[in-house]
Amino acid sequence: MVPQIPYTAIGIGISVIFGVWAFVVAETVKERAVIAGLAILIFIIGAMFRSRTGQLVVLIGWVVYGIGCIIFLRLNGMEVR
C-alpha cells in the first residue's frame, strides 16, 4: 500500500498559519475580530455539516480564508510570495 500525502490537512494548516500571522499584524480590534471570527465560523460549519458536501464547502472556505489573509498581509506591507 502506498502512503498518501494529506494535501487537505496541509492546505488547512497553511491557511491557519496565514490567519495567525494576519491576526498578529492586524492593528485594530475590528480587524482581529473579523480574522478570528471567520476562522471560527468555518470551523463551526465543518462541525455541523459532516457530509462530503460539507467537507468540500469547508475546504473551499479554508482556501478562500487563506487567500484573504494573504491579500490582507500584502495590503499591510508584508512580503508574502
Image (tube, helix red, strand yellow):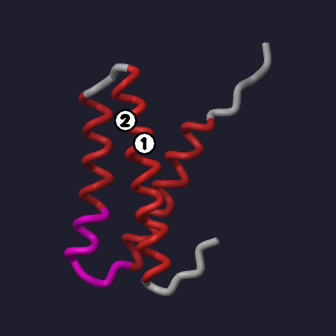
Q: CA distance from mark 1 to mark 2?
A: 5 Å
Q: Which residues are magenta?
A: 26-35
At mark 1, the secondary structure is helix
- Left or right placement of residue 29 versus residue 11 in this view: left
Q: Under tag 2, what secondary structure?
A: helix
Q: Look at label 1 and name its amino acid.
A: Ile
**Residue in the image at 25% along x and 65% along y:** 34
Task: Residue 35 in the image: state x and y as whole percent.
Answer: 31, 64
Is 44 in the magenta? Answer: no
Mark 1, residue position: 60
Q: Where the C terminus falls, by quadrant?
A: bottom right
| 70 with respect to 58 (left or right) | right
Q: Residue furthest right?
A: 2
Confirm or deny contact between disc 1 and disc 2 (CB under 8 A).
yes
Callout 2: 10 Å neighbours few (<14), some, many (20+)?
A: some
- Where does residue 60 sit, x and y in percent of width and height? 42, 42
Residue 22 x %, y %: 42, 71
Q: Is residue 81 above or below residue 6?
A: below
Residue receiving disc 2: 57
The relative height of residue 5 versus residue 18 in the rendered view (above or below) is above
- Residue at point 55% right, 46% down? 11
Residue at (38, 45) in percent of width and height: 61
**As drawn, 54 above or below 10:** above
